[in-house]
């Protein structure tokens, strides 16, 4: 567990992201089948163009993924994932943008880090000791995401004795393993993994209890953008979940999240600006 609470900055490659305000991670899925933007950015040139627009709109970092992890998604071969993500990571890193690679595969992590990725976003939370060793040798940050099972099966009757305690223990244990492997606390983010092997009730319970995760001392990331929990609460189909996603982002930040992973950067940045402007100074700490 880190010494100083709350965390003051995330060290990711050549960048330090100060955490005096919540940070927005823009999502780019270079895939044919992602649950909300699948097929839109399969062409690397379009993906780079979209990412540059996200940066212009106020994104603090860009998360590039080449394998959908939506419920029921089939795994993707290493070579396919590399072909999808590397050109995008390379172009954005050359632009001087903090780039994150969303992957479960150590081979993809290694190649993306070599191209200048500043963060590895792993829905398996660096379960692979080789991945922990790789990150320890790098100066990149890592986002440890909680997932129960794997994307192909994770939504088959998810069950927890106490979802908040289970997820918190899992993430803090894994963060401790990462520190033991040589990844400094200033390079670690944790994420409860909304939708990863969880019912709507589990997701809501985790978001309500976010301060318990925040109390662990690592910056917390939340990704609710366009997800089915938003659809469930609002009754809206995919494509009509922007307002619900903004509500979810603001609620997460009010509960202490310091990273928000979103598809709609411009709208989220505006919503956060107004949210922070209208909050009292006292309420504004530590965000
Ligand atoms: N959600 C998704 C993927 N990666 N990473 C983090 N840290 N947190 C999340 O909540 C999270 C994530 C799923 O969303 P998306 O990437 O848009 O879809 P797909 O997995 O279908 O590509």
Image: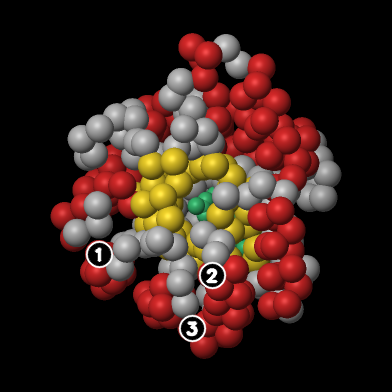
Q: Residue at x 54, y 42 (%)?
A: 23
Q: Residue furthest left?
A: 180
- Residue 54 appears at what percent x and percent y? 70, 55
Name the one closer to the observer, 122 or 264.
Answer: 264
Looking at the rendered structure, the secondary structure element under dot 1 is: helix
Say few, some or many: other residues with alpha carbon within 10 Å of mark 3 (under 14 / 14 to 19 / 20 or more).
some
Tell me if label 1 and label 2 are in contact, CB under 8 Å.
Answer: no
How many marks the image carries: the answer is 3
Say few, some or many: other residues with alpha carbon within 10 Å of mark 2 (under 14 / 14 to 19 / 20 or more).
some
- In primary-sequence order, the first of circles 3 and 1 is 3
Q: Is residue 40 left or right of residue 112?
A: right
- Quarter of the rendered structure image containing ligand 1: bottom right
Residue 63 can be seen in this image:
no
Q: Residue furthest bottom?
A: 79
Q: Which residue is mark 2?
A: 93
Q: Which residue is mark 3?
A: 78
**Placement of 212 over or under 182, stated as above or below:** above
- In primary-sequence order, the first of circles 2 and 3 is 3
Residue 139 can be seen in this image:
yes
**Placement of 69 over or under 252, stated as above or below:** below
- Residue 45 appears at what percent x and percent y? 73, 77
Q: Residue at x 70, y 70 (%)?
A: 47
The label nearer to you, 3 versus 1, is 1
- Residue 134 appears at what percent x and percent y? 28, 71
The quarter holding residue 278 reads: top right
Q: Residue at x 61, y 16 (%)?
A: 279
Q: Is residue 65 left or right of residue 241?
A: left
Q: Which residue is mark 1?
A: 136
């Amino acid at each position: 567990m880190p010494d100083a609470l709350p965390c003051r900055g995330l060290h990711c490659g050549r960048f330090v992201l100060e955490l005096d305000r919540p940070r927005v991670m823009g999502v780019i899925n270079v895939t044919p089948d992602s649950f909300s933007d699948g097929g839109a950015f399969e062409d690397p040139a379009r993906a780079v163009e979209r990412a540059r627009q996200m940066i212009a709109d106020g994104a603090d970092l860009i998360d590039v993924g080449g394998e959908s992890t939506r419920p029921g998604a089939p795994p993707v071969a290493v070579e396919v994932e590399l072909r999808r993500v590397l050109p995008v990571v390379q172009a954005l890193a050359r632009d001087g943008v903090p780039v994150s690679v969303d992957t479960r595969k150590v081979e993809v992590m290694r190649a993306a880090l070599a191209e200048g990725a500043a963060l590895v976003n792993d829905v398996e939370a660096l379960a692979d000791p080789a991945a922990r060793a790789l990150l320890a040798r790098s100066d990149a940050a890592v986002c440890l995401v909680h997932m129960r099972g794997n994307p192909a099966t994770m939504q088959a009757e998810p069950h927890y004795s106490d979802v908040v305690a289970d997820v918190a223990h899992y993430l803090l244990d894994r963060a401790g393993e990462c520190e033991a492997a040589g990844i400094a606390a200033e390079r670690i983010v944790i994420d409860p993994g909304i939708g990863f092997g969880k019912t709507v009730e589990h997701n809501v319970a985790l978001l309500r209890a976010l301060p318990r995760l925040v109390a662990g001392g690592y910056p917390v990331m939340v990704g609710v953008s366009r997800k089915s929990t938003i659809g469930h609460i609002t009754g809206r189909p995919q494509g009509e979940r922007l307002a619900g996603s903004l509500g979810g982002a603001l609620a997460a930040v009010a509960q202490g999240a310091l990273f928000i992973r979103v598809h709609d950067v411009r709208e989220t940045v505006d919503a956060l600006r107004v949210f922070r402007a209208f909050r009292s100074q006292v309420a504004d700490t530590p965000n």
